[in-house]
Structure formats: C-alpha cells, structure tokens
C-alpha cells in the first residue's frame, strides 16, 4: 500500500544525491560539448581524413548502448592508463581510478557523438549570405566566426543542448551498475531500507521533473537574451 508518511524522509535521503548528480552532469555536458564542437568543426570544414574519423566515431558511439560503453570503460580504462603510464616510466595503478571518473569518461565519449550532431546542425543553419556580406566589409575569417557566426550558432543550438543535458541526467542512472550513486541509485538504496519502492521512485520522479523544468527555463531565458543581442 502507498504510504505518504515516508515521502518526506525519502525526499531528504534522495536530495543528498542531487549535488553529485548535477556536478557530474555539468562536467559531462561541458566536456562533451567541447569535444562535439571540435568534431562538428572538422566535419563542417570538411577536413581530409579527420572528417572520416569523426564520422566513424559518431557511428560507433551512437550505435553502441551507453551501458556497454560504461562497462568497457570500467574494465578497460584502468589497463589502458596503466599501460600508457608504463610507456613513460611511471608506476601507476590504473585500478585506483574512482568509479565516478570512469562514468564521466564513458558518458562523455557517448554524448560527444550526439553533441557533434547538434553543433553541426547549428553550423549548417548559418546563412552563407551573411558570410559574403561580412567578407565584403573586410572581415577576416576569425572575425566572421567570432562576431557573426558564433553568436547565431549558439542561439540555434541552445534548445538541443538543453535536451542533451537532460539525456545526460537520465544516462547517469546507468552508473548504478558500477556503484556510482546518483538520484536514481539513491532512491533504490533508500527504498531497500524500508521496502517502500513506489514512494521512493515517485520522489525521484519529482526531483527529475523539477530539474528538467529549471533547465528548460534557463535555456529559454538564455535563448531570448541572446536573440535580443544578435
């Protein structure tokens, strides 16, 4: 039976995982956006060889389930880092890596493939006629990109980037498989203590909805502010 009396205690317990979840999500978002932007620029500029490598990367990481990438990183990353350290004469124990670091690396690698598509779409939405006009006014390529192209690309990408952040928030729940405690994992642990699973998961749903609403509001206000400036 549903017991409303456990909702408040469960809320206090699950809220304890919110700061770490948001911190990991923000770090993954920043790293994946930077990486994805570099990939998108390589495709947009049609850089030889690099463009083909980026396409292959996107196909691989968009097709493989994130949970598989997490386990590959969990079992493979320590050995890889230990091997690389040995090449430069450093005695390093790769298995000392915290699990949350492994989760961040794995999800960054996955989300970067999707962020590359977001940034690429924003780049392709740029009107090339504006570039011709800028060149006729004496703009250099760097000035065109910084003053004309970049502000418009950012505005065009904001809605999809906001969606990407929420995808990251949900993907972090997969970290429970390697013992990383996020909002979802904390709700499972909380429910395991009192056996009120429905109540704990409902609390988690409410927390996720509040975060989603906050992210949407921030994205909308940022987009409106930047559109006024551009």
Image: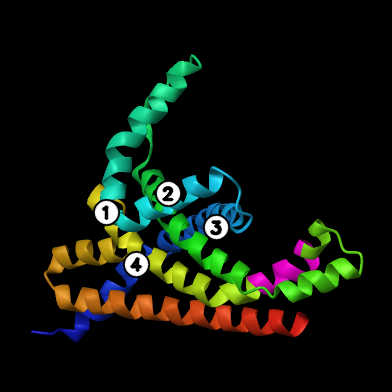
The percent position of residue 65, horizontal first and vertical second, equals 28, 56
Residue pictured at 31% horizontal, 35% vertical:
76
Q: Nearer the viewer, residue 83 or 90?
A: 83
- Image quadrant in which the C terminus is located: bottom right
Q: Secondary structure at mark 2?
A: helix
Give the residue number, with chain letter if any, for mark 1: 67
- Element at badge 3? helix
Residue at image mark 3: 30
> Is residue 76 rendered to the left or right of residue 90?
left
- Relative to 102, residue 190 above or below: below
**Over which residues does the magenta segment extend?**
145-153
Q: Is residue 14 visible?
A: yes
Per the model, the C-alpha gap separating discs 3 and 1 is: 21 Å
Q: Residue at x 33, y 71 (%)?
A: 12
Q: Position of residue 120 (x, y in %)?
A: 56, 64
Q: Position of residue 190 (x, y in %)?
A: 22, 65
Q: Which residue is mark 4?
A: 170
Q: CA distance from mark 2 to mark 4?
A: 22 Å
Dot 4, how many residues are within 10 Å of its Cα: few (below 14), some (14-19), or many (20+)?
some
Disc 2 designates what residue?
57
- Pair 2/1: label in front: 2
Given residues 62 and 160, the one toward you in this image is: 62
């Amino acid at each position: 039976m549903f017991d409303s009396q456990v909702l408040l205690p469960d809320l206090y317990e699950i809220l304890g995982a919110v700061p770490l979840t948001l911190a990991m999500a923000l770090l993954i978002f920043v790293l994946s956006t930077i990486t994805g932007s570099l990939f998108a620029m390589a495709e947009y500029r049609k850089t030889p060889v690099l463009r083909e490598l980026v396409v292959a990367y996107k196909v691989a990481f968009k097709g493989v389930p994130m949970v598989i990438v997490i386990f590959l990183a969990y079992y493979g990353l320590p050995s890889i880092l230990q091997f690389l350290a040995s090449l430069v004469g450093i005695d390093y124990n790769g298995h000392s890596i915290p699990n949350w670091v492994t989760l961040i690396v794995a999800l960054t690698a996955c989300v970067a493939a999707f962020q590359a598509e977001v940034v690429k779409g924003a780049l392709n939405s740029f009107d090339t006629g504006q570039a011709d006009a800028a060149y006729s006014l004496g703009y250099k390529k760097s000035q065109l990109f910084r003053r004309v192209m970049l502000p418009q690309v950012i505005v065009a990408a904001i809605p999809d980037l906001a969606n990407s952040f929420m995808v990251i928030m949900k993907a972090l729940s997969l970290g429970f498989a390697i013992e990383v405690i996020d909002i979802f994992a904390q709700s499972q642990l909380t429910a395991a203590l009192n056996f009120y699973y429905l109540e704990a998961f409902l609390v988690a749903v409410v927390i996720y909805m509040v975060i989603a609403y906050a992210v949407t509001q921030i994205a909308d206000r940022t987009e409106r502010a930047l559109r006024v400036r551009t």
